[in-house]
Image (cartoon, coloured by chain):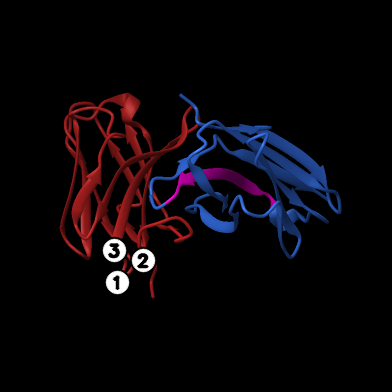
Chain colours: A red, B blue
């Protein structure tokens, strides 16, 4: 398996622009997670899906952030409009089933820079 | 609030030495405690994990020690090697629930 695939790997944009990050989870995994990593706050869970349905979006910082999972093999995280404070590395992860002990497999991340 | 507190944030250890990273948690509902390892430019990867029904778990050079009453757990890396240089995250999640809370991370550098 190719693992979790994220695109783009790097994104540089200007403040106010729309940014869309993409993720393809490992085939057969029921859970998909979006995380944000910054030096100040570490790894933060933004939202996660079970069988394409959003379960917990309490980590989404504000209404400028939205996430969708139209099918089992694709998810997007959109920021509109983007701001410099959104600059971070965004990770997508997937796991086979719910419950503790189920390993989350992370993608390589998308490094977002908002100028 | 920071539900999982991790220290130190950076650590330098000589090759062959023992690296120790400590974490403490507040939420008594947590019952699964994984450690993740992250190399530069990569996503975190599961290293080792423990449940509170055991006080210690060892996998090769990596050992988790767990103190349920103190709500603390730690990662020990024995015979540390330069290839262990990475950022390590402790984490915790409640039973039957996928929401994992991560510590701030510890950047480990093992020098020859």
Residue A104 lies, with reference to residue B110, above or below; the image says below
Q: On the rendered structure, is B96 left or right of A12?
A: right
Label 2 to label 1: alpha-carbon separation: 7 Å
Q: Quadrant of residue B83?
A: bottom right
* Dot label at residue B84: none
Label 3 to label 2: alpha-carbon separation: 5 Å
Main SS, magenta residues: strand
Label 1 to label 3: alpha-carbon separation: 6 Å
Q: Residues within 10 Å of mark 3 (few under 14, many from 20)?
A: some
Q: Could you tell me which residue is drawn at 37 percent across and 61 percent down?
A: A95
Residue sitting nearer the eye, A26 or A80: A26
Residue B93's x, y, as percent? 47, 45
Residue sitting nearer the eye, B37 or B76: B76
The magenta-colored residue range is B85-95
Q: Could you tell me which residue is drawn at 20 percent across and 64 percent down?
A: A72
Q: Which quarter of the rendered picture does the N terminus of chain B lie within?
A: top left
Q: Could you tell me which residue is drawn at 31 percent across and 58 percent down?
A: A31
Q: Earlier in the sequence, mark 3 or mark 2?
A: 3
Tags 2 and 1 in contact by the CB under 8 Å rule?
yes
Mark 1 residue element:
loop
Location of mark 2 (residue): A96
Q: Residues within 10 Å of mark 1 (few under 14, many from 20)?
A: few
Confirm whether the magenta stretch covers residue B89. Answer: yes
Q: Output the chain of dot 1.
A: A
Tags 3 and 2 in contact by the CB under 8 Å rule?
yes
Location of mark 3 (residue): A30
Instruction: Residue at the far bottom: name it.
Output: A1
Tags 1 and 3 in contact by the CB under 8 Å rule?
yes
Q: Output the chain of dot 3.
A: A
């Amino acid at each position: 398996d190719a693992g979790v695939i994220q695109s783009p790997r790097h994104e540089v944009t200007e403040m106010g622009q729309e940014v869309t990050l993409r993720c393809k989870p490992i085939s057969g995994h029921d859970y998909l997670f979006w995380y944000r990593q910054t030096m100040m706050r570490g790894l933060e869970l933004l939202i996660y899906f079970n069988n394409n349905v959003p379960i917990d979006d309490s980590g989404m910082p504000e209404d400028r952030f939205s996430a969708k999972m139209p099918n089992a093999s694709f998810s997007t995280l959109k920021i509109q409009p983007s701001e410099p404070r959104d600059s971070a590395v965004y990770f997508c992860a997937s796991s086979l089933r719910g419950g503790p002990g189920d390993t989350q497999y992370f993608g390589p991340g998308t490094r977002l820079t908002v100028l | 609030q920071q539900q999982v507190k991790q220290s130190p944030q950076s650590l330098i250890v000589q090759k062959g030495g023992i690296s120790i990273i400590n974490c403490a948690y507040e939420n008594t509902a947590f019952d699964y405690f994984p450690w993740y390892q992250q190399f530069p430019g990569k996503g975190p990867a599961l290293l080792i994990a423990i449940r509170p029904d055991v006080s210690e778990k060892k996998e090769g050079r990596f050992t988790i020690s767990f103190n349920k009453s103190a709500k603390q757990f730690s990662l020990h890396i024995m015979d540390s090697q330069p290839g262990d240089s990475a950022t390590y995250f402790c984490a915790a999640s409640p039973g039957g629930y996928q929401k994992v809370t991560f510590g701030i991370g510890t950047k480990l550098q093992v020098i020859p």
